[in-house]
Image (spheres, rainbow, N blue to C red):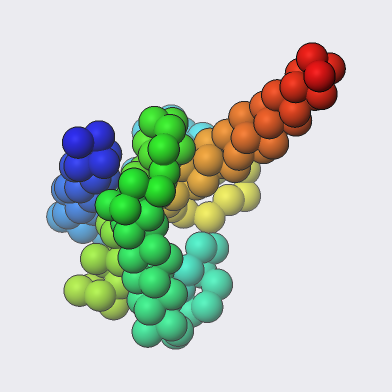
Amino acid sequence: MRRYVALLMAAALVGIDQWIKLLAKEFLKPGETTPIIQDVLHLTYLENRGAAFGMMEGKKWLLIWATAAVLLILILAVMAGKIKRDFPLFTVCVIIGGGVGNLIDRIYRGYVIDYIQFRFVDFAIFNFADMCITIGTALLVCYLLFYELIGKKREAAKEQNSA
């Protein structure tokens, strides 16, 4: 049951992402920027035809197939019950939601709509789906490092000390 709830959460994230992108396409003009906080946070419409930071521009089909393969593996892992704990299940579904959101753009538009720009640092323009992928991946890596690796080492040390 929790697998289905997690996948519904991923679907909700896809819906949020696509809704925001529709708003960005409707209200933001290419090349223009709208300050939310002047020189800090702007809404800037960009049609990204590559991957993160515009890398691999012009490799649309490679990006589509690679993304689809990774998403398929993650979805199958969720559906097969391979992810036992709630936190990693949550993070994987956040990654799935972001990945599917950007995959929809790539397939149907030929580009990904980006619109969030932090001006106080020289950073790429990105979107809600990118945030889902990045935050989900960072949380999953932290979980795997701190909980799985360190936690298992502690458990092994306790077992060795008690023996």
Q: Position of residue 22 (x, y in %)?
A: 17, 54
Q: Residue at x 69, y 36 (%)?
A: 149
Q: Position of residue 112 (x, y in %)?
A: 33, 65
Question: Which of these two is toward me, 108 or 158?
Answer: 158
Q: Residue at x 55, y 72 (%)?
A: 55
Question: Which of these two is toward me, 141 or 36?
Answer: 141
Depicted 100 relative to depicted 2: above or below: below
Query: As drawn, which residue projects farthest toward the front?
Result: 163
Question: Which of these two is toward me, 146 or 148?
Answer: 148
Q: Is residue 33 among what the camera can see?
A: no
Query: As drawn, which residue projects farthest toward the top?
Result: 162
Q: Position of residue 151 (x, y in %)?
A: 67, 27
Task: Locate the C terminus by quadrant.
Answer: top right
Task: Locate the N terminus by quadrant.
Answer: top left
Depicted 62 relative to depicted 156: above or below: below
Q: Residue at x 28, y 52 (%)?
A: 79
Q: Residue at x 62, y 49 (%)?
A: 122
